[in-house]
Amino acid sequence: MKRRRVLIAGILVVGAALPAAALASGGGEHTRTLVEQVQDATRGFRDVDAAMAAGYASAGSCVSGPEEGAMGIHYANVGLVGDGALAADTPELLVYELRNGRLRLLGVEYLVLVDDWVAAGNANPPVLVGQQFQLVNSPNRYGLPAFYELHVWAWRENPHGAFVDWNPNVSCVEYTGEHASSGN
């Protein structure tokens, strides 16, 4: 019984120290949600011209599918897709929607090829700020080797959740191919 009380007291001391340590360090990235971090990292990319200047290019299609809604128009940074790394402030893909003739930033997709992830020494699937990635095997509709992905709807609400692939509030109806319109 005494041993149990000592163990519980130790857990309480450690538990009480953790929030204090987080406050002392200013909280850092771990206290901000992934959605907040994405908003901070992509605020400047609401203008698609700024995204293109930073190395993002359109994948040339609007992704819709069997689920309700769509994913949108993906702009990929090929250098980030092939680096085998993941970071909240450097998403591999930006997701836009063409609405009323203008591209609007909706969120991001983090993507890492399975082979690159494993080659970087990772044994488990990726998790970013507490969010588990999904595995997309090959062959797939995108023509990519097997990859892990995570969508984050930072600029358009998704009633199914901020990390669900398909968003019923997104449409590909206006997208007819690449166009000269940009900006928000």
Image (cartoon, rainbow, N blue to C red):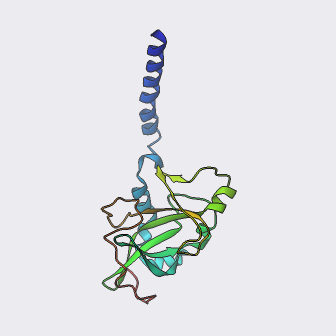
Q: Is residue 49 left or right of residue 138?
A: left
Residue 82 locus on image (x, y percent): 63, 67
Which one is nearer the viewer's eye here, 13 or 20?
13
Q: Position of residue 18 (x, y in %)?
A: 45, 33
Residue 128 makes an appearance in the image: yes
Looking at the image, which residue is at 44% across and 43% down? 26
Looking at the image, residue 93 lies above or below residue 132: below
Look at 45% across and 63% down and name the residue there: 151
Residue 20 lies, with reference to residue 175, above or below; the image says: above
Q: Quadrant of the C terminus?
A: bottom left
On the image, the x and y values in percent for residue 140 come to 55, 71
> Residue at 62% across / 69% down in the picture?
145
Residue 184 can be seen in this image: no
Give the x, y percent position of residue 183: 39, 81
Q: Nearer the viewer, residue 124 or 89?
A: 124
Indicate left or right for 102 with 54 as reference. Answer: left
Q: How many marks?
A: 0
Quarter of the picture containing the N terminus is top left
The residue nearer to you, when weighing 179 against 118, is 118
